[in-house]
Structure formats: C-alpha cells, structure tokens
Image (cartoon, rainbow, N blue to C red):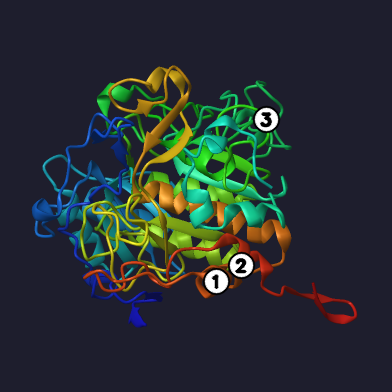
C-alpha cells in the first residue's frame, strides 16, 4: 500500500500527496457501454463523446465548473478568519458542505478555477483548495427474462445457490448515486426506500436534512448543463433523466418471483435513489460528496458509485472517508470503461471496492472496455447485462427488449452493481459486518481468472456470492463470540 497525504490509496492510484495531485487531468467517464441486443453498441447518454484508450490523455486541462472552487480551511479557523481570507482574495462564499468543513467559493470573472485554487492554497489557513471537478457516468426466480436465460451471468457468480441462503433484507438500504431512479417501474416500485421522517408533500424539511419533501430520496444534480433545466439543489426531483440509474437499481434489487421482467442480485433489499448526475450523466465532486453524506446520514449501508474519472477530488475523498469510517458504509465503484491500465477515481481509493468487468462469450476474459490494474478488488460480468429501464428511454440510446421496459447494456457500471448486490446480501445475513469484513468475504471467496495479458485485471477474481455467504460469521454478544 502507498500513503498519499492523510489516506491510503491502493497500488495503481495516482502518485502524489494531497496538494500535489494531478490537477490538470481530464475527468473521464466511467460510463456504461450499451450493447445492442442485435449486437450494436452505443453510449448510455447522449452527451459525452466516446473515449477510447488511445485518446486518454492525463495532460489535458481538467474539466471543472467555471466561476467557483472548493476550499477546506484548517482547524481551528474561525468564520471571521475565513471571511478575512475571502475578502483579501476578493472571492465570495456560495455555500458548502458543513460536515466536511468544505466551503464553495465564487471566484472573480477572468480567474480560472486552477489559478484561484493556487491562491487559496498559498494561505496558511487553508488545508486544500481545488476546482469543483466534473464527473460523468461510469431461490431461482420465475421472472421471464431470468427463465429465458437472458440473465446468463447469475450462474457464473453463483447467485441462485446464494438465494437459497439469503435473498436480501428490506432493512438493508443500498443508495444508488446516479442519474435518478424510476420509482414507479413495475420491477422496482416495491423496492424503493421511504423516508420515515418525512411528511409527504408538505413543502417542509421535516427531518432538517436539507432536502424538502424527500419522501423517497434527494437530488443534488448540479446545474452545469443548460439543457437539463434543473432547479437549485438539493430538491426531491429523483426522476431518472437518462436511464442509467434505473438500470443500476434493477441490477441490484429488481423484485424476484413477481412474474415480470428480471431479478436483481439482492431482490429483497431496499433502494435509495440519490441523484447526483444530470440528464447528460454529468455531475460534480460537490454533488457526489453531498449525495454520499445524505445517503449515509439517511441509513444507507451500501453505496453504489457507477461513475468517476481520473482527476482526484479531496472533497469527494473526504466524503468517502466519512461514509466508510464514521457511518460504516460499504462503498462499491466501477473501475472505468476506457480500456486503461489505470483504475478510475474514486474506485482506486483504498476504502472503496473497485470492480472490473468480464466478457460474455469469453466469460473468463476481461471485457475489452474495462479498466484494470492493481487497484481492482474483484471482477464481475459486465457485458450483455439485462435490467430495468424507464419506457421513455427505449430508443436509440438504450437497446430495450421488444416493447418492454427492460434493456440490455454493458459496462463496469453494471459489474459494480452486481457486487453492490452481493455486499447487500452479506449485510442482510449478518448486519454487524464492517465494510472491511464485507470486502474480505467478497475477496476471499472470489475465483481467480486468467490474466490474458492484463495483469491484475480481475483483482482477487470473479465474485462468487454463494461461497461469500457460506463463510462463518461471528457476532459479538453478551455471552461472548457466537458462530452462526
């Protein structure tokens, strides 16, 4: 393991301490590659261009929100001292993330975010300053698409025998940090989280969590794309504007044995929609950090992050550390879809379970688009995955199955979702497991796959759900240690 600043990175992460990170690298999309049922391939979102391994260039300017930066002051620094710094530099506070001590600062016209960050970091009161970087989207059921073998990958990861042990407990909440979720989808509507502290549609923040009327989740999607026309955030608009979030949610927790559609990996658990990406699949470090903290404060035990890039954000890293260390959340993230020997951020962080993707026709081989490297923890199938989709997105962007609200797609996004489901099953069986114990069970039970010229592409190997649930579980009780 290598130390970078105050946290540990997996080997394969970017080199440098907290202030010396590569702030000129472009944030690249861990976006899903959509595979047509007829064999065609397209992007899951209409906005981002296709990025190939040959076009990946870490020397390109970073993509960030113009006119603002994120600043964390050292402790203890008083509000008055912060105001003096901002006044001296001619900048204005626009809000921030109180739990992380991060302030969002508006900068003067004509000053670039990189230049403003350098000015702030030169002050002794400042711990770090950075641009607000832009991220982009990366029992046997009777459900017909499972029975017809379209969900071919479940046998490969030993899901059916796992369901004989555990199908998921509704008390285990998995937050899908994504483009939103279609909470009325027939295969998801019974799996959606309900906020017990919220009074529906009374236009008040009943639980004082910063989100009004968040009966089923909250949106932090940023206003960085004019075509999306969002209100100021946070708000309760968790409707899926792209399809990606609904697809991920279905891979994790689509209802089983309801005679329709598909089965999720953990069909009995609960999905919490947390919208952090806009209608083009774009988000920011701040929107992701806000969404993570909302999710864990609201009781999510597993966080699925199927997006990312290569530019590191200390703000987002701080949020992940809080979620892992303080709230005990299991955090799963996609490795990236640029066929690169570098695991994307935040998947490469030590406190995140990084997932790569394997093929369909050659199930022991790395998917051609999947990133790889020493930072990978486990792999899971990522090609020709079948899941839920809002009907309105069944067009050229998503390859749907007939006239049904189900699509076929490929990407490390969906490999990560399979592993999030596996983690949720482990927590359903033993709710006292720590994040590192969940990781240990997934890693220890994985089956190693051939390297095929891509060293460490699969981490410990392909996730095996049933063996991970069959491992002895120990609980600390009044009378001592109890083995289940």
Element on which disc 1 rests: helix
Relative image position of residue 199 (x, y in whole percent): 71, 27
Give the Cα distance between marks 1 and 2: 6 Å
Instruction: Report the residue at 58% width, 71% height from top.
Output: 441
Q: Residues within 10 Å of mark 1 (few under 14, many from 20)?
A: many
**Do residues under tags 1 and 2 come within 8 Å of each other at their CB atoms?**
yes
Residue 204 locus on image (x, y percent): 64, 27
Q: Residue at x 65, y 35 (%)?
A: 142
Residue 25 position within the rendered picture, expressed as x and y whole percent measured from the top left: 17, 57
Position of residue 422 relative to residue 372, above or below, is above
The one nearer the camera, 156 or 174, is 156
Can residue 220 be seen at all in this image of the molecule? no
Picture quadrant of residue 31: top left
Q: Earlier in the sequence, mark 3 or mark 2?
A: 3
Rendered location of residue 173, percent (x, y): 64, 48
Q: Say which residue label 3 marks.
A: 258
Residue at the spot of label 2: 467
The residue wearing badge 1 is: 445
Residue at 46%, 24% in the rendered image: 390
Q: Is residue 436 left or right of residue 341?
A: right
Kindly report the distance in space between the C-alpha atoms of the residues bearing marks 3 and 1. 30 Å
Compared across the picture, whether 11 is left or right of 98 comes to left
Per the image, label 3 sits on a secondary structure element best described as loop
């Amino acid at each position: 393991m290598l130390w970078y600043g105050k946290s540990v990175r997996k080997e394969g992460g970017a080199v440098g301490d907290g202030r010396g990170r590569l702030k000129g690298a472009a944030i690249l999309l861990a976006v899903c590659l959509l595979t047509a049922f007829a064999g065609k391939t397209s992007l899951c979102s209409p906005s981002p261009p296709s990025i190939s391994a040959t076009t990946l260039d870490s020397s390109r300017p970073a993509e960030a929100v113009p006119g603002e930066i994120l600043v964390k002051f050292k402790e203890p620094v008083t509000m008055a001292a912060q105001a003096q710094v901002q006044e001296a530099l001619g900048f204005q506070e626009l809000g921030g993330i109180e739990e992380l001590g991060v302030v969002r600062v508006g900068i003067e016209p004509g000053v670039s975010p990189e230049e403003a960050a350098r000015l702030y970091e030169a002050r002794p009161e400042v711990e770090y300053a950075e641009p607000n970087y832009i991220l982009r989207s990366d029992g046997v059921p009777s459900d017909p698409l499972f029975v017809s073998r379209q969900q071919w990958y479940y046998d490969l990861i030993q899901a059916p025998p796992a369901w004989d042990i555990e199908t998921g407990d509704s008390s285990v909440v998995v937050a899908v940090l994504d483009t939103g979720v279609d909470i009325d989808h027939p295969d998801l509507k019974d799996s959606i989280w309900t906020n017990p502290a919220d009074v529906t549609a009374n236009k008040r923040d009943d639980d004082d969590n910063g989100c009004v009327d968040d009966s089923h989740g909250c949106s932090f999607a940023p206003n960085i794309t004019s075509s999306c026309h969002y209100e100021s955030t946070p708000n309760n608009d968790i409707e899926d504007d792209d399809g990606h979030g609904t697809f991920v949610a279905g891979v994790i927790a689509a209802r089983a044995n309801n005679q329709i559609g598909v089965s999720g990996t953990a069909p009995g658990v609960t999905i919490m929609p947390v919208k952090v990406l806009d209608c083009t699949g774009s988000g920011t470090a701040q929107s992701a950090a806000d969404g993570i903290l909302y999710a864990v404060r609201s009781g999510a035990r597993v966080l699925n992050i199927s997006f990312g890039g290569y530019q590191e954000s200390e703000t987002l890293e701080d949020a992940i550390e809080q979620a892992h260390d303080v709230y005990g959340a299991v955090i799963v993230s996609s490795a990236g879809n640029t066929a690169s020997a570098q695991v994307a951020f935040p998947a490469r962080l030590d406190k995140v379970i990084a997932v790569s993707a394997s093929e369909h026709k050659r199930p022991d081989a790395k998917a051609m688009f999947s990133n790889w490297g020493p930072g990978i923890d486990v792999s899971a199938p990522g090609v020709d995955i079948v899941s839920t989709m809002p009907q309105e997105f069944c067009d050229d962007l998503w390859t749907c199955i007939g006239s049904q609200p189900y699509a076929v797609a490929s990407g490390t996004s969906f490999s990560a979702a399979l592993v999030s489901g596996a983690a949720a099953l482990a927590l359903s069986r033993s709710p006292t497991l720590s994040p590192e114990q969940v990781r240990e069970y997934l890693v220890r039970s994985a089956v190693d796959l051939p390297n095929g010229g891509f060293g460490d592409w699969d981490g410990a190997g392909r996730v095996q759900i049933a063996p991970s649930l069959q491992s002895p579980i120990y609980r600390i009780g009044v009378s001592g240690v109890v083995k289940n």
